[in-house]
Image: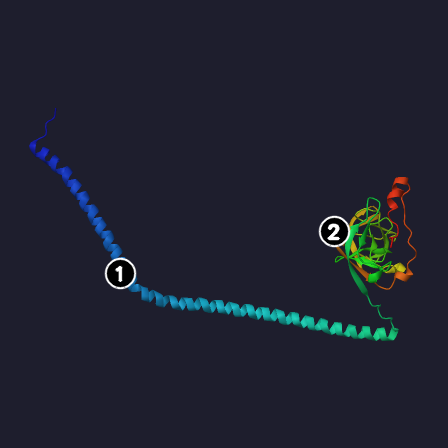
Amino acid sequence: MIRLSPARHAATRITVPFLIGISAIMIVVGKADQMVFESVRNSVTDAAAPMLEMLARPMAALDSAVAHAQDILAVYQENARLAEENGRLMAWQQVALQLSAENAQLRDLLKLAPEPPISYVTARVIADSGDVYARSLIVNAGQENGVARGQAAVSGEGLAGRVSEVGSRTARILLITDLNSRVPVVIEGSRQRAILFGDNSEHPGLRYLDSGSAVRIGDRIVTSGQGGVFPPGLPVGVVAAVDGELPRVEPYAALSRSDYLRLLDYGLAGALPNPVFLAPRSGKHAESAGGAQPLRR
């Protein structure tokens, strides 16, 4: 067993308390230094605050000036654009005025007959008298309201059909999708004429197109005015499908969801022939088509 000398043993006993004391002193001094540093930093910040505020004011003013200049530039550019657009509109106005004057002169020269006045009656749909073999509606307006056979029935979107039968207070509307419906139409872009025929489906077809005529999906269909049944220009629908040589049309009017129809009087009712209804061949179909009879008064 090794024995320490008395001097070394005394040094060992003093070393440990000494180190502990040094560590405690260092911790206290470190804390004191941090508190002193924070105190000095806060004092410097408080002293420099007025100066920093004075320096910040010119920077804020500079930022505001830059933003104001950008706003002025944007207003200048917008003004230039509006001036250019106004110039174009003025040019179009001059063209429109010139065309209007030429149109008035040509009308006077040709002695064109004025357009007939249009009157209308708004009626509520009170019954859907259609079935698998017919497409028609009953409205609560008749002869007492000025409704006459042949008047065009339109919704807010487009042509729905025509008045086929009239009673005293009710009328039957033959829809453009009905088997008996035939409407002379024109393809608005190409001016190709055709007949819109109904076959009791949701999408009537186009027949009697010129050979080689190109019909595209999305082409707009309007009435042509031929035959004296409908006036020209009433919106009908758009081409929704091209099935070989038989284009199909999506009507503008929501025929199955129409609550009100407007019956337009163009003064064409006297030119209509007596109604002739197509009936299916079979007895069962004939019974179903038998519902398309004149309204009893």
* Sequence-wise first label, 2 or 1: 1
Instruction: Left or right? Give the position of 39 relative to 108.
Output: left
Q: Quadrant of residue 193?
A: bottom right
Name of the residue lying farthest toward the top: 1
Identify the secondary structure beneath mark 1: helix
Dot 2 and dot 1 residues touching (CB under 8 Å): no
Quadrant in which the N terminus appears: top left
Residue at 40% of width from left, 69% of height from top?
Answer: 58
Counting other residues with Cα less than 10 Å from the Cα at mark 1, is it few (<14), some (14-19), or many (20 or more)? few
Mark 1 highlights which residue?
A: 43
Type of amino acid at the residue the image marks with label 1: Ser
Q: Which mark is residue 257?
A: 2
Identify the secondary structure beneath mark 2: helix
Where does residue 43 sit, x and y in percent of width and height?
A: 26, 60
Please tell me which residue lies in front, 176 or 78. Answer: 176
Of marks 2 and 1, the one in the foreground:
2
Q: Can the viewer see residue 171 in this picture?
A: yes
**C-alpha separation, residue under disc 2 versus residue under disc 1:** 80 Å
Quadrant in which the C terminus appears: bottom right
Type of amino acid at the residue the image marks with label 2: Arg
Indicate whether 255 appears above or below 285.
Answer: below
Where does residue 77 sit, x and y in percent of width and height?
A: 58, 69
Where does residue 262 sit, x and y in percent of width and height?
A: 78, 59
Q: Which mark is residue 65?
A: none
Q: Can the viewer see residue 233 in this picture?
A: no
Please tell me which residue lies in front, 171 or 246. Answer: 171
Counting other residues with Cα less than 10 Å from the Cα at mark 2, is it few (<14), some (14-19), or many (20 or more)? few
Please tell me which residue lies in front, 53 or 62. Answer: 53
Where does residue 215 sit, x and y in percent of width and height?
A: 81, 52
Instruction: Left or right? Give the position of 186 relative to 73.
Output: right
